[in-house]
């Protein structure tokens, strides 16, 4: 990402749902899979292309995992003004965890921006 990056008031992330899914495959050391449903809403007057993301998973046992990369679920969606992009993904944890992070985007004028992912919990029932 070239140049300065600023928090973009026009983008909002909503955690639509978090579901414990014990039927999904998970390794023995992290036996608790969760599916989360996310939507990114563009309330600005300009299109924004989501170029990357950074997730921080803080497990209750103290382990911290940082996941970052290009795009989101293998895509670089363009979110038009008034539009949104929704997807789901999953994460496995040893026990409970708090999740937060940010999405990074680029406006139609080339400005780099980000929006925060509101913290949510992965609580094993």
Image (cartoon, helix red, strand yellow):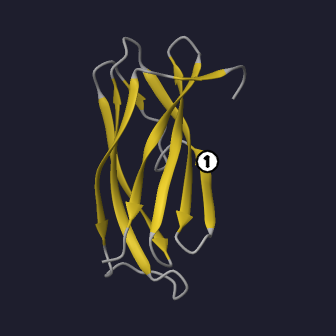
Query: At 72% from the left edge and 20% from the top edge, which residue is drawn?
Result: 3
Does 46 sit above or below residue 7?
Answer: above
Tell me the quadrant of the picture where the N terminus can be found. top right
Question: Which residue ends up furthest to the right in the rendered image?
Answer: 2
Q: For label 1, count other residues whose C-alpha is less than 10 Å away and answer few (under 14), some (14-19) or many (20+).
A: some
**Left or right: 84 as drawn, with respect to 3:** left
Query: At 36% from the left edge and 76% from the top edge, which residue is drawn?
Result: 124
Residue 59 at x, y percent in the picture: 54, 68
Tell me the quadrant of the picture where the C terminus can be found. bottom left
Question: Which residue ends up furthest to the bottom in the rendered image?
Answer: 28
In this orientation, which residue lies closer to the viewer: 39 or 122?
122
Query: At 69% from the left edge and 20% from the top edge, which residue is drawn?
Result: 4
Residue 112 at x, y percent in the picture: 60, 22
Query: At 53% from the left edge and 46% from the top edge, which residue is drawn?
Result: 101
Picture mark count: 1
**Left or right: 32 as drawn, with respect to 23:** right
Q: Which residue is mark 1?
A: 69
Does 97 sit above or below residue 17?
Answer: below
In this orientation, which residue lies closer to the viewer: 72 or 13?
13
Task: Assign a secondary structure to mark 1.
Answer: strand
Residue 80 at x, y percent in the picture: 35, 21
């Amino acid at each position: 990402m070239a140049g300065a990056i600023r928090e973009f008031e026009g983008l909002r992330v909503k955690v639509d749902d978090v579901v414990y899914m014990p039927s999904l495959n998970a390794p023995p050391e992290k036996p608790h899979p969760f599916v989360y449903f996310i939507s990114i809403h563009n309330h600005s007057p300009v299109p924004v292309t989501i170029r990357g993301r950074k997730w921080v998973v803080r497990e209750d046992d103290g382990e911290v995992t940082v996941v970052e990369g290009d795009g989101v679920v293998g895509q670089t969606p363009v979110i038009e003004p008034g539009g949104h992009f929704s997807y789901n993904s999953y994460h496995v944890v040893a026990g409970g965890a708090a999740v937060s992070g940010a999405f990074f985007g680029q406006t139609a004028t080339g400005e780099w921006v980000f929006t925060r992912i509101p913290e949510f919990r992965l609580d094993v029932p």
